[in-house]
């Protein structure tokens, strides 16, 4: 059962892993969704202090998972430049950890409008499906991405941070700084952090890359990222608009009945 728990990518059997949206993949998605829903229900009426404490606990778990992954890679002789935590969702671990203890607006915007859709996309189109179900890389992939999503949702629902469209420049600034640096590192080392040099295997962007080339892929990929950020602002803004309107109506009704 655990024969390939520590087996790394290059040493995996040809018939290892499981298909995208196959039974195993769907089981992970269902389990993560159920866990998030249960946590939201349980935390909905809890105090802000308890919610903040949970965010810090989740941050510690994320850092522990990433530390464990790097230690296993080092001990098994597979640690290299390409295993560094430089993918967007790997960087997200440190961004959420910083926000848990230092809730500044810059990190709050990233947590709510960048990390939430990015981690969700990672769960829907994971690039670690070649690993067996009971492999540490597979478990780390689903666990870390699920916690990233849960952290972002709790941040939003608890009211700890409220993103605003006028702060979109913060998210764009992050990409303006990170993308050129990561791209240069990819070219230098032949890596593909943040999928800047080629699409993730099995992703919808792979068809565009194969049919129209790298330039078309990068343009569509960049436009999709921007569209997702704008969609997040729109959805979050609509939710807060309805919530604020409902609160205002209830307040006026209560004042009228006095």
Image (cartoon, rainbow, N blue to C red):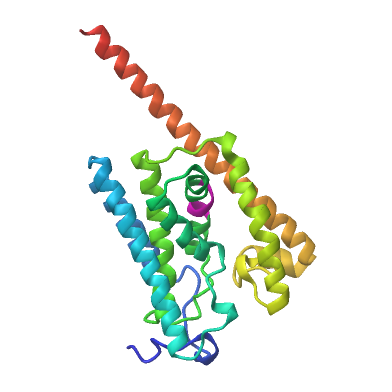
Start-end of magenta stretch:
113-117
Rendered view: 41 above or below 57: above
Residue in view at x 36 percent, y 70 percent: 64
- In this view, the residue in front, 84 or 19, is 84
Q: Is residue 62 above or below residue 159?
A: below
- Confirm whether residue 24 shows in the render: no
Name which quarter of the figure residue 97 lies in: bottom left
> Residue 171 appears at what percent x and percent y?
59, 47
Q: Residue at x 43, y 89 (%)?
A: 75
How far from the left and from the top, in percent, is residue 107?
Answer: 49, 49
Q: How many marks overall?
A: 0
Asked if 70 appears above or below 125 in the picture, the reply is below
Depicted 170 relative to depicted 58: above or below: above
Residue found at x 53% / y 57%:
118
The answer to whether residue 240 is seen in the rendering is: yes
Q: Nearer the viewer, residue 256 or 206?
A: 256
Looking at the image, the residue that sits furthest to the left is 258
User: Seen in the image, is 16 located left or right of residue 194?
Assistant: left
Q: Position of residue 1 (x, y in %)?
A: 32, 88
Q: Quadrant of the C terminus?
A: top left
Seen at 33% across and 53% down, the residue is 55
- Tell whether position 244 is magenta: no
Q: Residue 210 at what x, y percent from top left? A: 74, 70
Q: Is residue 178 left or right of residue 161?
A: right
Majority SS type along the magenta span: helix
């Amino acid at each position: 059962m655990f024969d390939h728990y520590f087996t790394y990518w290059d040493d995996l059997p040809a018939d290892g892993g499981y298909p995208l949206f196959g039974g195993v993949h769907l089981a992970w998605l269902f389990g993560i969704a159920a866990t998030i829903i249960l946590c939201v229900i349980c935390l909905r009426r809890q105090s802000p202090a308890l919610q903040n404490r949970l965010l810090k606990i989740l941050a510690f778990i994320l850092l522990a998972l990433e530390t464990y992954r790097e230690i296993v890679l080092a001990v098994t002789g597979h640690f290299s430049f390409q295993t560094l935590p430089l993918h967007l969702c790997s960087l997200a671990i440190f961004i959420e950890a910083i926000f848990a203890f230092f809730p500044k607006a810059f990190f709050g915007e990233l947590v709510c409008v960048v990390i939430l859709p990015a981690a969700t996309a990672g769960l829907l189109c994971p690039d670690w499906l070649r690993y067996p179900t009971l492999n540490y890389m597979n478990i780390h992939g689903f666990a870390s991405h699920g916690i990233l999503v849960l952290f972002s949702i709790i941040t939003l629902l608890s009211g700890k941070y409220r993103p605003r469209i006028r702060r979109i420049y913060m998210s764009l600034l992050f990409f303006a700084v990170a993308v050129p640096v990561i791209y240069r590192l990819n070219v230098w080392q032949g890596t593909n952090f943040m999928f800047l040099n080629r699409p993730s295997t099995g992703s919808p962007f792979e068809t565009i890359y194969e049919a129209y080339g790298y330039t078309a892929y990068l343009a569509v990929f960049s436009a999709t990222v921007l569209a997702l950020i704008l969609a997040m602002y729109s959805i979050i803004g609509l939710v807060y608009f309805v919530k604020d309107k409902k609160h205002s109506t209830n307040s006026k009704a209560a004042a009228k009945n006095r």
